[in-house]
Amino acid sequence: MANLTNKQVYRVNGFSCAGCAGTFEKNVKRIDTVSDAEVNFAASKITVYGSASIEQLEKAGAFENLHVRSEDDEVTVERPKKLFVMKYWNVLLASVLFFIGLINQTSFGEEHALSYSFFLLSMAVGGYSLFKTGLQNLTRLQFDMKTLMTVAVIGAIIIGEWTEGAIVVLLFAISEQLERFSMDKARQSIRSLMSIAPKQATILRQGKEMMLSVKDIEVGDILVVKPGEKLAMDGEVLRGHSSINQSAITGESIPVEKNTGDTVFAGTLNTEGYLEVKVTKRVKDTTLAKIIHLVEEAQAERAQTQSFIDRFAKYYTPAIMVVAGLVAVFPPLVMGGSWEAWVYQGLAVLVVGCPCALVISTPVAIVTAIGNAAKQGVLIKGGAYLEELGQIKAIAFDKTGTLTKGEPSLTDYYNLSTEMDYTILQWVTAIESYSQHPLAGAIIRHAQQEQIDYHNVIVDNFSSVTGKGVRANVNGRSIWIGNRQLFDHQANINLSEEVNTIVNELQTNGKTVMVMSDTDKILAVIGVSDEARDQSKSVINTLHSIGIKHTVMLTGDDKKTAQAIAMKLGVTNVHAELMPDDKLTSIKELRETHGNVAMVGDGINDAPALAASSVGIAMGGAGTDTALETSDVALMGDDLEKLPYTVSLSRRALTIIKQNIALSLGLKAIALLLVIPGWLTLWIAILSDMGATLLVTLNSLRLLRKNKSLKR
């Protein structure tokens, strides 16, 4: 039984595939002092139960030159990035050799020594690791995709189909690099999460300020946070008032006012005032650290997508070999048939069974679909995600920055004075131009859009009332702008029934309300909110029309705001006031109910949910790097309208893959039936194989016609 008390976690550099990670795990388990080990391939980590030195672990990973370090060690030197040519040299060189072979084939024919030499070299360069593993699997009677590929290429070589064999190898090499690329991106997402919070912070000890590493900060220490600084630790406000932009953690679109006793999080931004924060958690226990852990665990939990061909290959390849053997020897032995004739028939069966068309059926469709998607501004990080997206039953959306614009804007304006609208807005903008509050930005943007000239308005005696609003003199007239609390405690002006009705209505609709007054009366009421994107409602309606009946909005915002947006857009369900772990729980519940669930998001707080969903989809233009790297699909250009197109394309690709498999197997079945009367010849076998490959390729190319305007 594993000793679960002595547990060590290590980071591993150098994994190239899931199979290699599995081999490393087995090697580590063989160490005498290790009772158990678990590899998290997506996070590039290994958890060791028992004891093992780094030297022992690196010896266990020597077959792939793995480098191991403790999880607590900080990386001080980054490995230089490889040039594109150096990183993908085998695929690039194999492509060049293949095209040279094609040129020679056009000039001299496929059977010319130069032609097949270049095709053979292309296969050797692009498929070295494939053949190495495939041949090993054949000797061990293990039948997987690599075994199938190896048999396909050997079959192509035997019958002289050099072009076909080289294409198969090249496509497989490209798909391998796509898998490696997506895994590298998944690991980068975790590294970028770690850099959100500062590595050092100012601490107040015994009345003196000192700069300390976050590792040396203890629970109970006093953290000093000045305006414009990020918080390094989780804690509780001890002194001061400010607005904290915590969208990176909670997804709230508008900064939250923080006063004494309020909770604050590491990685969030202090926008206004001076704060002293009592640290409540060590750096390894912060909310941000928890998000990192959630991302790693979610990636580890999600099973590797195993393609239909992989599963089928376990039975298809050995079955064809057995059938070919029986055809060659059974009639001569049992029925006294001609050995020469039946061995020829057996060889023809083996050629018919050559799985080139079957093997190419999936990658051709996937490469075509991914290429088409890229032209439309959609980055799909691999064929597995394309297939998963084609089976989606429900889609969950983050609100802020995904369904909404991600920044506050002026949505409502009530002029309750005798002044002109232009004048009131001119005064408001002039005053707010002195403020650092994010809501001030909404006022200024509106003034710029409406071409309101506020620069000549004379503003003096400006002061900010933290958490409540501002006051200033405009042309010698005292003006107050702020929330309801400002007028209850500072301005000493009672809000009339009319004003209270307007304020309550705006708040019910999820708006943040700003009231403007002079020393005597209320002048105006302004509503500010994070507005829905113009295309969000039509996107939701289109998704419903193409069969995605369940759309869910997940947000850290309050319930009133969330419900107001949800009703406007037509989403079928809404979950509000969620922290990152709540979003993750919601995704897991949706997967239990609906099976395949996609998640669309753009923020750091979305990262765990993106990783845990069947397919994580990121908004590429406004999205954070973490969301992009944790996701499986990225909608570049920040265009939500690409989502229905992507779902439709994926479904079409899945249909074509199934058609390709049916075509390749159907033609082979017809050819095999010719064995019964003894009519099967090598030429018919070759034509059957070539015909299936051609039909599969042409069928896959139909995906090029799938453009953004096609919704179904």
Image (cartoon, rainbow, N blue to C red):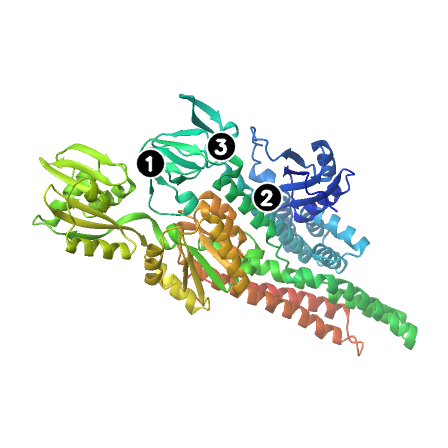
Give how far across and how far down residue 480 sits, in percent. Answer: 17, 41
Which residue is the site of mark 1? 271
Q: Secondary structure at mark 1?
A: loop
Residue 442 position by quadrant: top left
Q: How dense is the environment of label 2, judged by Cα within 10 Å: few (below 14), some, or many (20 and up)?
A: many
Q: What residue is rendered at 63% in x and 55% in y? A: 106
Q: Nearer the viewer, residue 592 or 448?
A: 592
In the rendered structure, the answer to whether residue 450 lies left or right of residue 651 reads left
Callout 2 touching callout 1 (CB < 8 Å):
no
State which mark lies toward you, 3 or 1. Answer: 3
Decide if residue 124 is in sight here. no
* SS at badge 2: loop
Left or right, residue 521 beside residue 170: left
Q: Earlier in the sequence, mark 3 or mark 1?
A: 3
Q: Are marks 3 and 1 in contact (CB under 8 Å)?
A: no
Which numbered circle lies on residue 43? 2
How far is disc 2 from disc 1 in space, using C-alphas?
A: 33 Å
Type of the residue with mark 1:
Thr
Residue pictured at 60% horizontal, 46% vertical? 42
How many marks can you see? Answer: 3
What residue would you read off at disc 3? 219
Left or right placement of residue 52 versus residue 534 in this view? right
Q: Where's residue 487, x and y in %?
A: 19, 44
Q: CA distance from mark 3 to mark 1?
A: 24 Å
